[in-house]
Amino acid sequence: MFLQYFLVTVFTILVHSASSLGTFQQDQLSGYGHEIHANNESSLLLKLRRLMAVNNNQFENSAKRSKGSRRYVVNVDKFGAKADGTDDSQAFIKAWKKACSTKQSIFMVPARKVYHLKPVTFEGPCQSGITMRIQGSIRASTYMSDYEKDRRIWLKFENLRDFTVDGGGVISGNGQIWWSKSCKVDEKQALTFDNCINLKVTHLKIKNAQQMHLNFRNCENVEASNLKVKSKETSPNTDGIHVSGSRNVQILNCDIGTGDDCISIVSGSSKIRAMDIKCGPGHGISIGSLGKNGEEDRVSDITVTRATLTGTTNGVRIKSWQGGRGYAQNIVFENIAMQNVTNPIIIDQFYCDKKEHNCKAQKNAVQVKSVLYKNIKGTSALEKGIIFNCSETFPCEGVRMQNIELTHNGQSSEASCANINVQQIGRNTPRCPKQL
Ligand SMILES: *[C@@H]1O[C@H](CO)[C@@H](O)[C@H](O)[C@H]1NC(C)=O
Ligand SMILES: *[C@@H]1O[C@H](CO)[C@@H](O)[C@H](O)[C@H]1NC(C)=O
Ligand SMILES: *[C@@H]1O[C@H](CO)[C@@H](O)[C@H](O)[C@H]1NC(C)=O
């Protein structure tokens, strides 16, 4: 009886979220018990339906009703969007108000049209279960004066819960006008997600961001999947996906090629998994930089698995500044292919931007601890396939290598290893010399 009640409850939840049953719901379900195998959705639904048939009518009726009810569509065109090259921001803001107040609504950006937006904030809290479905294209205003209020943002999503962005459309930051006058201090972002919980961003192309393409800031339970993120190799500071202060983030099946890091993970982030990533051109997959200006930064439980890096300046990198505090720990880089990568494996505890900073060695450093490199193969563009440049006062700890094979010009590459004692498992080329 308990099981029946339990299954009915699960079924009700399932039906309510039927159209958006994403990985998170599945992940949550799979923890519930042995009877249920949420990865076989059809068999689960089948079992539940059978159970429903012999169960009380009240549930069945309510389930049918919610299953039959269509989601309310808020089409930006109905709110005055013209897609004729003029500014569509006001129409989007009006449409958002409506969508935000309507549970399970779909904010629709129709296909085969191009909308132009100034900086817009899609602000919550909103009703839950809202989807922004971008099927057409959205382009950024190219008038600098439109960005005067907050030069760092273009499209911002804030304080949202159970929110999805999808649709297969294209978002273009029209970044060319910014790249020529790039200013690092601004850190301008195309898409910013701030304080979002249970967020899914999927099936979109994001290109030519002003600087960063996607920024997840102080978010929890995020799936960023099936994204194509593209801008020119020479575009400055155009990180692909940037994660800061966020927990439980999955970056899945993304193809990223930009002028900066494909993925960068910085302070306050934990439980981050990047899987099935194509990266290049760009600066690779980075943890950091950490500890700038003496800050205390903490990053932990990061996994990068099944990635291919092509022609990037770094492969998998951990970088921190001298003088910082905190840690980067419990990190796994595995099943990674490198193709002509300049620094395939690198830990740099002496990261420094010489233009802005004094780069002297200092007493404090961000502790790098428990890092596994496993099944990483391919080619290095330079002789050094591995650089572990750890600081004397805070040596790198608990670093393990297993099945590494990095060649340069058909021969084994070299390893440069300072202040680190690497535990070698299996065959590794190159390998760090044993230190005292
Ligand atoms: C899922 O379950 C159904 C019904 O039990 C079965 O027919 C189907 O083969 C299963 N699919 C997978 C992928 O396991
Ligand atoms: C490898 O990368 C280097 C430096 O980025 C570049 O000059 C060279 O042409 C690349 N080689 C191949 C075979 O792609
Ligand atoms: C390690 O960092 C120091 C300090 O910045 C630098 O002088 C040195 O060249 C680096 N070593 C390698 C192998 O990159």
Image (tube, rainbow, N blue to C red):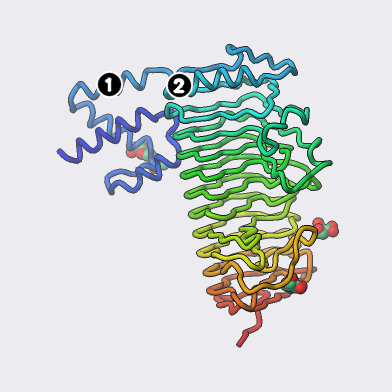
Q: Nearer the viewer, residue 359 or 238?
A: 359
Q: Residue at x 35, y 28 (%)?
A: 15
**First along the sequence among labels 1 and 2:** 1
Closer to the observer: label 1 or label 2? Answer: 2
Quarter of image, res 180: top right
Coordinates of residue 351 in the picture (x, y in percent): 70, 64
Q: Residue at x 43, y 24 (%)?
A: 104
Residue at image position (66%, 68%) is 322
For the residue marked with disc 1, what is the amino acid?
A: Ser
* Quarter of the rendering occupied by the C terminus: bottom right
Residue beneath disc 1: 62
Per the rendering, the mark at residue 163 is none
Q: Say which residue appears at 34% left-offset and 44% top-offset.
A: 37
Q: Amino acid at mark 2?
A: Ser
Q: Is residue 110 left or right of residue 27?
A: right
Nearer to me, 5 or 88: 88
Check residue 101 in the rendering and tell me which mark sits there, or answer none. 2
Q: How many marks?
A: 2
Q: Secondary structure at mark 2?
A: loop
In front of the other: 195 or 386: 195
Separation of disc 1 and disc 2 at Cα? 23 Å
